[in-house]
Image (spheres, rainbow, N blue to C red):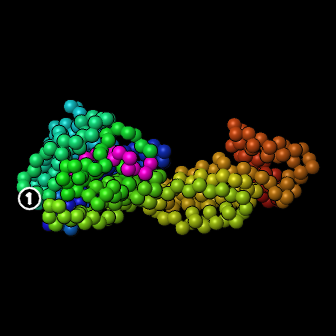
Amino acid sequence: MTHFLHTADWQIGRQYGQFETDDAAMLAEARFEVVARIATLAAERRVDAVLVAGDVFDTQAVSDRSIRRLFAAMAGYTGPWVMIAGNHDAALADSVWSRAMQLGCIPANVHVPLTTGVVDLPDANLAVLAAPLTQRHTYDDVTQAFDTLETPPGRIRVGLAHGSVAGRLPDTIDATNPIAPDRADRASLDYLALGDWHGCLSIDTRTWYAGTPEQDRFRGNEPGYVLDVRIDAPGAAPVVERIATGKYRWSAWTETLSLPTDAQALAERMAALRSDDVLRLDVQGHVNLETWDALQKAVAEAAAQVRALLPDLSGVRLEPDEADLAELRASGYVGEVAAQLQALQADEDQSAVASEALRLLLRFQRETATPGAAK
């Protein structure tokens, strides 16, 4: 039996500019940590090899230190690794891979083929047909060469490639780097290990995307896994097990508020979040001042307990209720200003400013009308 791990899309060096600096640093660090977990997992499961299907690095410009750190993170597994270049780290004449070789930091047990060919691992009875990308975008199927690549008799034939299986991915993505959906059959592969799609996905029984082992975007396509693959003999169906490896859970919530109870329910959901959550929150609707204050407090408390929070409350309109209007002495000048600001919230260009001005007006009126209010 041949036993290996299939992983892809490590994206080492990925930047998270939309987050606060501290949060971005932790999310970037998680990508090194998951590689170390994969190495530990490979050692614990005593696999014959680890196959990495491209986009090991997120950019060609990753620092020398990050290159060294990546290979150091892999040290926990001393068996063979086979990793190929993807579209983010294509094997150009001058690339992150050529720098890694110049730095001398690629261990002897790590195979990095820079052209299409066979990496033969006789101790594992495994022949890896590798198709690294040599440019970021191509419109040719680089796996077509697998059809004619010869491997030693009796070897398990496994393809390793990075690209888009034509017509089989759930979302519309770039049409570059195409891969024929029946490549495993055409090339007599026992398994085709793919990278590029960041979710764990089975195309057929012999063709799989492992997805990124650490989620890196707000897309619910089953990221955060590596695949444990066992193949008894050439021609036997592979037995594939998904193993969770991700540390952080990314979620995107879109909420519409129309009643105070809606805001309360949202606050309760946010209170259940933990330190491994990364949340993008988009809130729309209309609330009174009391509900707005409660919403702001709930968001602030959630931000303190999760790894990262990206709130967008610009779609929330402040609509004073009867109690708010009474505090504004609605029959007077202040009430007229409040009514004008409330109307301006319907203007897309002025909505955010008008809502904030109305909130400040209501708060100021409340504080000045309350004896002993904060100055």
Q: Looking at the image, which is closer to me, 56 or 34?
A: 56
Can I make out residue 96 in this image?
no
At horizontal 46% and vertical 56% (from top left) the residue drawn is 220
Residue 125 at x, y percent in the picture: 10, 59
Direction from residue 57 to residue 168 in the image, left or right: right
At horizontal 13% and vertical 53% (from top left) the residue drawn is 127
Identified by mark 1, the residue type is Gly
In this view, 104 is above or below 233: above
Q: Quadrant of the N terminus?
A: bottom left
Q: Looking at the image, which is closer to me, 218 or 140?
A: 140
Direction from residue 219 to residue 118 in the image, left or right: left
Can I make out residue 123 in this image?
yes
How many marks the image carries: the answer is: 1
Residue 160 at x, y percent in the picture: 22, 49
**Residue 246: quarter of image:** bottom left
Residue 254 at x, y percent in the picture: 59, 55
Q: To which residue does mark 1 refer?
A: 154
**Residue 268: quarter of image:** bottom right
Magenta stretch holds residue 343:
no
At horizontal 66% and vertical 65% (from top left) the residue drawn is 264
**Residue 142: quarter of image:** top left
Magenta stretch bounds: 159-171
Determine the residue located farthest toward the right in the rendered image.
331
Instruction: Tell me if mark 1 has few (under 14), some (14-19) or many (20+) residues whose alpha carbon lies within 10 angstroms of its own.
Output: few
At horizontal 46% and vertical 62% (from top left) the residue drawn is 275
Magenta stretch holds residue 165:
yes
Callout 1: helix, strand or loop?
Answer: loop
